[in-house]
Structures are given as C-alpha cells and as structure tokens.
Amino acid sequence: MDKEKIIIEKDGDSIECDILFTFDSPDTLKTYIGYTDNSLAENNRKNIYVSSFDPILGPGSLEDIKDEDELEMLQDVLLQIDKESKA
Amino acid sequence: MTYIEQLESRINETRKKLESLYEQSSKLKINSNLNYQKSILAVELDEKLKDTSEKLRDLLSLHDSYSLINNYFNDLNNLVELYQKEENTNLRDVISKEINNKRNFISNILNNNLPETLKKELKVAFTKEPIINEEKITNNNSEEKRKVEANLNKVENEIQNYNNELKAIFEEERNIKENTIFNSNKELDDFINLYMNKKIEQTKKIKEALKKAEILNKRLLRLNNKIFEDKRLKEEANILKITPKEYKKIITRKNDKKELDIFLKRLGLEEIIIERNMLIDKLDKNYAKKTIDIKINKEAKDYSNIVDINESKKALPNNKQIKELESFDIQNVINNYMKNIDLKEKETNNEIATYGYQTVISKLVNGLEPKKKDGKRYRAANIEVKESFKKELQSGNYLYNIVHVVPAVIKLPFNFLRKVTSKITYNPETKRRMEIIKNRLDHLSDQDLMILFKEYSNHVEVERYSSGLNILIEERISRFIDEKVRIINNNLEIKYKDVYNSIKELEAIDNLLRDQSLSKYLRRDYLDYRETILDGKASLIASIRNDYNEAKTLLSSGLHGFRENIKATETKMSYVGKRFAKDHDLDVELLEREAKLERAEKRAIKDGNDEMALRVFVQAESLLSKNTSIEKSIFGNRSTGKKYYSPLAEKLDYRNDPFIRDIFTTIAMIGATTSVVNSLNAKKEIIEKQKEIDAINSHNENTINSVNNYGNMVESRKDALIEGMTKQNYQDSLNISNMLERKSLDQSSEIHGGWSVGTTAYKDFRTTAQNSYNEFYNSTKSTLEDITTNYAAGNITSLEALNKLSELSASSQSTVAKVAEESLPHLINYANNHSQFDLVGVKEAMDYIVANPTAITKMNNSVYEMTELGEELANLSIEQVTALQTLPNTIKENLISSATAASLAINVSNTMHTNYKKGKYGNNITQLVKNYIDTQDNKNKKR
C-alpha cells in the first residue's frame, strides 16, 4: 500500500504524488483522496492536496472541494487521523 | 379499502421490511470480524434481502401496471361517453377505433409485461372492478332510439313546414306574376331577385333539414338493426343456454372470418387470411361494421325528390364540394378532438404546476442527502491512512498545508484503481442509500416523472446533483419513456399492418376490376369493398405520422438528449467516443422526390382523400426503405444507404438490442484490459523518461549525435506509431462510448430481469466470444499480476517489466484481433436481418482491428526500443529533451482514455451476463415493407 502513488497531470507536466489517506462519505456519496507531491510551501510545510471523486464513475476525474460542509468534514478527518497517529 | 390502497399498504410493509433487513445486514457487516455463525447469518440476511427486494420490485411493477391500466380505463370511459354523444358516423368509427386501441393497450399490459403470477393478480383485481360497461351502449339503444325518433319527428315537421312555406312562396310569386304589369326593367328585376332570394333561402333551410333527417334516419335504422340484432341474439343465446355477449362473440367471429376468408381467397390473397385472422381480435370490427353501414346506406330513406327546383341546386354546393366539406368537417372534428386531448393535458399540467423538479428531487433525497442549513456535519467512513503518513505524523517533524486543486487529469496505479472500485462497489451504506432512492424513484407518479424528464432534458439542473442520483434518475426516466414509446409502437405496428394489408387488397381488387368481362354484380361488390378498404385511411396515415413524431420526440430529442446530458455530466467529456453515424452527401434529387411525396401526403390527409393518402404513404415508405436497404456492402442489406428507415421509433436506438450490447461488451472488455496493459506500459515509460530528464545536468556536445540518431529512430518508427495509435483510437472509440452506454443498459437490464436474446447468430457469437474472453482474461490476469508483483518487489527492473508488458500487450492484441475476426461474420449475419441498426461505425472499427492485428504490438516495440536507446544516452540538451517530450505526450493522451475504459470495464464485469432469457427482437414492420417492395419489384420484372 505504501508504494501506491498517484500521478496527476497539470499544465502538461506529470507529477508523481504519494497517496496519504482515503475515505468515503455516506452523506455526499463521494470518495475523498488526500495526496502530496512532497513540495514545500513558503512556511516550510508540506502541501497536502485533497480531492473528491464519484465512486460510481471511478477516480478518472477528480473534483475540487469547495463546499463548506465538506471542508468541515475534511477537517474532522484530519484531526481524527492526527489523534490516532499519536495514540 | 381499494385494491390500489391494499397494494400501497403491501408496498410500504415490504419497504419497511427491506429497510430493516438492510439495517441488520449493515450492522452485522460493519461490526466485522465475522465468525462462522455470523457469516451464516450474513448469508441468510443477504438471501432475505434479495427475496424482499424482488418482492418489492414485483409489487412496484404491479402498482405501475395497475395505475397505467387505470388511466386507460378513465380514457376508455371518456371515449365511450364521447361515442354515445356523437352522431356523426365517421367520427363514431374514429372513436370506436380509439376505444379498441385503448383495449389493446390494456390487453398488452395484462398479457405481455408481467410475470404470470402478477398477471393473474391483476386480472383478478380487474374482474372485481369492471373494465368498461360494454352493455352500456347496447342498453341505451332503446333510449337513444326514442331520442332519435323524437328528433326525427321534429325535423320532419320542420321539413314539412319549410316545404309548405316554399309552396306558398311559389304560389305568391305565381299570383303576382299573373296579376302584375311590370312597367320597367328595374321593377321586373326587383321582382325576380326578391323571389329568387326567397326561394334560395327557403331551399337552404329545407336542404339543411333534409340532411339532418337523413343522418337521423340512418342512425335510427342502425339502432333498429342493433335492437333487432340484440333481441335475436338474446333469443338464440337463450336456446344455447349462453349469455348474449358470448353468443355474439362466437357468431361475429365466425361470420366475419368466413365471409372475409372467402372474399380474400377470391382475390388470391390467401396469405392475408392468416395475418388477418391473427389480428382479428386486435383490430376493430371495421369490416363487419362497414358492411352494415353500406346496407343502411342502401336502405336509407331517399329525400332527394322532395325538393325539385333548379335554383336550389345552384344555390347549394355541388357534390364534390359537399364531399370536401364533409371530409373537412370530419378532419376538423378529429383535430378538435385531438386539441381537446391536448387541452386536457394542459389543464392537468396547470394543476401540477404548483410544484416542480425541486419538489420531486426533494422527495427522492429526503433524509438521505444532507441539507446545508440543518447544522449537521457530514460523516466520513472507511478512513484508510497510509502507514508512511502515520509515521510522519507520529514523528512530529512535519506539518502539512491543505491545498485544494483540481488536477487536469489523473492516472492511478491499476491495483489502487481496482481496490477503490471494489471497495466502493461493496460499500453497504452507499448501496442502501442508492437502493432507497431507487425505490422512491420507482414509486414516483407519472406526473413527477414527466417533470423530471422535462427539466433534465433541458439540462437545467443535471449538474447540481450527485452523479449517483443522476444515474438512478436516468435509469428510471429511461424506463418511463421506453414504456410510453413501447405503447405507441404497439399501436404503430397494428396500424402499419392495416396499411399494408389494405394496399395489397386494393391492388388485388384493382387488378380484378381491369377485367372487362366482369359482371355488373361482381364489379359493384368489388367497388363497395374497395370503398370499405379505403375508408378512414387518410386519418389512419395522419395518426401514424403523429404517433411516430410523438415517439421520436420522446426518444430522440427527449430521451436521447436526456441521456446525452447525463453522460456529459457523468464523464465531464463533451464528446464521448465515436458515434455510429454515417456521413453521406446530400442527395438533392432524392430529397426532392421525398418532398413531393411529403406534400402530396399532407394534402391528401388535409383533403380526406383516403386513396391518395394510402398510396402516397406506401410510396414514401418504400422510397425510404429502398434507399436504406438496397445498397450493397459487406453488410448486405445494411442501412449503408442514403436514408435510414425505421418505422418504429423504439428500434432506432441500437443500444436497446441485446446482441449489440453483448458484442460491444465482449470486445470492449478485451480491449479495455489491453488498454490497462498499455496504460501501465505508458506509465512506466513516462516515469523512465522523467527520471532521464531529471538526470540531465549539463550540455554535452557528444550527445548531439546520439540525439540525432534518436530523432532518426523516432522518424523511422513514425509509421508504426501512427498505425498503432490509430488502432488504439478505434479500440478506444469502441470501448469508451459503448462501455458507458453498457453501464446504464446493464443497470436497466437488471431491473427488468435481464435482456432477451434468441437468434442462432446471437448464440453462436456469444459462445465464441465468451470462450475467447474467458481464456484471454485468465491468462492476462495471471501474467499481469506476475509482472506487477515482481516489479513491485524489485525482482525485475522497470525496463524488464516494460519488455514483459510489451510482450503481454502483443498477445492481448492478437486476442482482440482474433475475437473481432470471429465476431465479424456473426455481426454481418445479424446485421442482414436487422436493417434497423446502423452498424457502419462498429464494422469500420472491427475491420481495422482485423486488418491490422500487429499495429499496437509494433507501436509498443517501438516505444520499448526507444526507451532502451534512451537509457544509453548519458546527457541531453534541454532542447533535445523538449523534442523528446512530444512523444510521450501523444501517447499519454491516447492512453488516459484507456484507463477510463478499464475502470468502467471492471464495473461492468461485475454485472454483465447474469440475467438473460430467450425472447424475440427485431422489427416486423421493416420486414413487412421489404416484402411488399420485393413483391412489387417481382411484378415489375415480369412486366
């Protein structure tokens, strides 16, 4: 599983990213995927990209997450992951 | 409690049971670590779930069918009421036909659409609630007779009075003429004009009254006949100890069939006898009814001698004009009748305009989809975190920024893709929610469904809702529209048969009439029968055109547009695969011929010219059919012609045919798996290239020569790459467009209990394809797993993996080519018998694959060789790297779509080939038209 990578293409460039986590939401009927290209932001922190896709169609096309309720859920998930990793 | 209430109560109970079972099942599975006993329980629960779902589906079908039939009953009752009120004979016939059509629809629903047990239940339910009071018309005959007699008396009195007044005018005129001396021309002219006008005026009144009397008299005679007939039937039935209704059925059938059979044999039309006998229960009793009408006409009271003045004839329209006026009136009345129906629908729409699609969507998702204002947070499930990420978080050395982007395109490792897909497919919570929405959709009223259909067809709201919901709505709306179109098509089929039987009979009679030695008696008989055949054909043709347009509007502009909207939203693609359409130059001459026929037909319908309408219709249909089927190609009579002929609207959609679906699926499955190999192939290749690019440090003059060599090699491999990519495109066009369509079809077929198949060609193909596919899939799967496992474990290098994948790809290609080659003859055989499907695109794609079996292999070899060469290059200049980048980009674009097809293939593989049963498919009408044309062509050749 650690070896699983995701390749995204942006502006004609292929970027290899590490998959960090995945989860589903029975409320939105979507699956969410978190991944990183290991790039660092100005604050020296790693960037995590989070996108969603429709499980019926498969992960052929990722969608941005803009909905506030979805963002809140994402925050909950990250807190939970963080908490569990330290447990 | 009414039956429908009972049914609804049963549905609710079953639904509750289903939801409770789901809950139990979900709890059991979520609290996993299933021991043996729990596993047994889970299996039992699954079985119960399956049974209860099936039961619910049956009950919902029963509910739908019952509601549908109920609607028809309402229509029927309205029509019966119209029939009773209507005095115009022709219009009564039109209404009578409508009544029979409605009965046919009900009969079709009862007989064709349901499992046997449900049919029985429906029939029992409807025997308790009588379909239609058939005796109502008969019982009212006496009362109606009294009314008609009263009217007739009144009108006859009027006639008498008008005649007396006319006589008085004549008398007055004669007196004045005898006793007056006219002193000027003006006085004379004034006198003549005054009495002329008076006489004309009076004559008009008499004529109108006479016409009324004539109609009433005919009506009275018919009622007398009916009353007499009923009395006789009653007496004779009493003797036989059966009901008059049963007795009437027996003798009507016997007499009609016998008389008709003798007549048709005399005309040399034995083959129609069989056809006619089969239809005799479906079609109205035109023949019997019209024969009675003719007798009545002959016996009708003749009023023509009552008025005998030349002036009155001048003042009234001539016979031709009267005929036109009558026809015009009939058409007008029919049009008004149709308008009334439209108005009725509009009124209904106005009534339901108090709510729209949002209300309907809200009904569907209530309690299932969250509302933004309810303050509840969305829940997450199935959270899976990578070990490496956990470790990083544990170390506390890293902090993360959350960034939200939309990547343009994504490629995922095959094993991840498969895992995600299977995980989602079996997510019980998602499945439960989808099932609930599906059930709610099944339970929506026709009005609700129509609202959704209209809104979604206009593409107003599709994008706002989740794809899962859209897919379920699409499936339900498709079923709803398909059912509507099926009913219209049943009606069309009956009408077409009527038209083609009529034209055959007409031509046979015309042949007999050409015989100069024919006796007057026979000639009169033939002419009478000729009139009978033609009667009402203009309105029949008009109704065929209307039905077809209605069905096409529902399917092509409606349902097709609807599906395309959904598809575009689902895939985020505006153009999906290659469409199976033909490109032809516009044939102006053919267009002109069609336009002429179209004008003639419309004119004939407008004028109520039955014969012209019938003949022009058949000509136009033949012209279309000929230009569809006559052109020779590898497909024989395939629709490779300039026109596309398909009289039944439903059959225009090739996606509804089980054979076509299966051929696509099998080819697409194999092609998609090959594409997965290719996408893996490309992925490794791209990674390798990326590494090489990363390794470039500085300029190195020595590499120039190497790059030149590299460029030359690319150039020398260009043809192989182009050929390979072309083939890949063909395959992808087959894969993508049809896999997407297959997906919704499979969902629909599951709901309908499987699609129907039956022909030998189909069975042959299926066996061949299935064998090839199984053999291929098993070997590819194990080899693929072997390669990826070894590569992941570091046992083989990326180059070795690439090489092995190229070899596997070559083997896959050979299988694809083999299957395509084996399938082609069956496709051709099938296509010969199903001219309604346009399969040129499929044929082109398959031909290319067969003709170029090694194209992809060559391409892959080229890529491999180039990669190998690339490894030898130590350093490249940035310009050279840029040049190299053009190659992978082209391949990337090509293969990304393959990955999409592959993910869909996995979805489809779970649902395909589970339920199917034998059945008929095809199109009787195209065959009917073709037979007619063949007969005509043979006749022409003999001449």
Image (spheres, coloured by chain):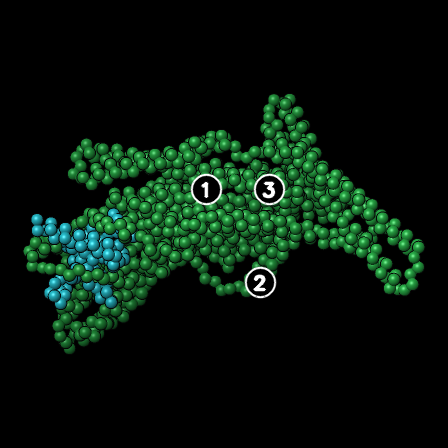
Chain colours: A cyan, B green
Q: Tell me where residue B730 sits by quadrant.
A: bottom left
Report the residue at 83% width, 57% height from top. B194
Q: Which chain carries label 2?
A: B
Q: What residue type is labelled 2?
A: Glu
- Circles 2, 1 touching at the beta carbon (< 8 Å): no
From the viewer's side, name the closer residue of B415 and A69.
A69
Quick check: can you spot residue B282? Answer: yes
Q: Tell me where residue B242 sits by quadrant.
A: top right
Count of numbered tags: 3
- Circles 2, 3 touching at the beta carbon (< 8 Å): no
Q: Mark 1 points at which residue?
A: B920
Q: Which chain carries label 3?
A: B
* Circle number at residue B532: none
Question: Percent x, y for residue B690?
Answer: 18, 65
Q: In this rendering, is residue B394 above or below B585? A: above
Q: Name the residue under label 2.
A: B592
Q: Name the residue under label 3.
A: B82
Distance in Å between CA atoms under marks 2 and 3? 42 Å
Q: Which of labels 2 and 1 is toward the front?
A: 2
Which SS class for mark 1? Answer: loop
Q: In this rendering, is residue B626 above or below A42? A: above
Q: Which chain carries label 1?
A: B
Q: Which of labels 1 and 3 is toward the front?
A: 3
Which SS class for mark 2? Answer: helix
Graded by Cα atoms within 10 Å as few (under 14), some (14 to 19) or many (20 or more), the crowding at tag 3 reads some
Of marks 2 and 1, which one's residue comes earlier in the chain?
Answer: 2
From the viewer's side, name the closer residue of B643 and B706.
B643
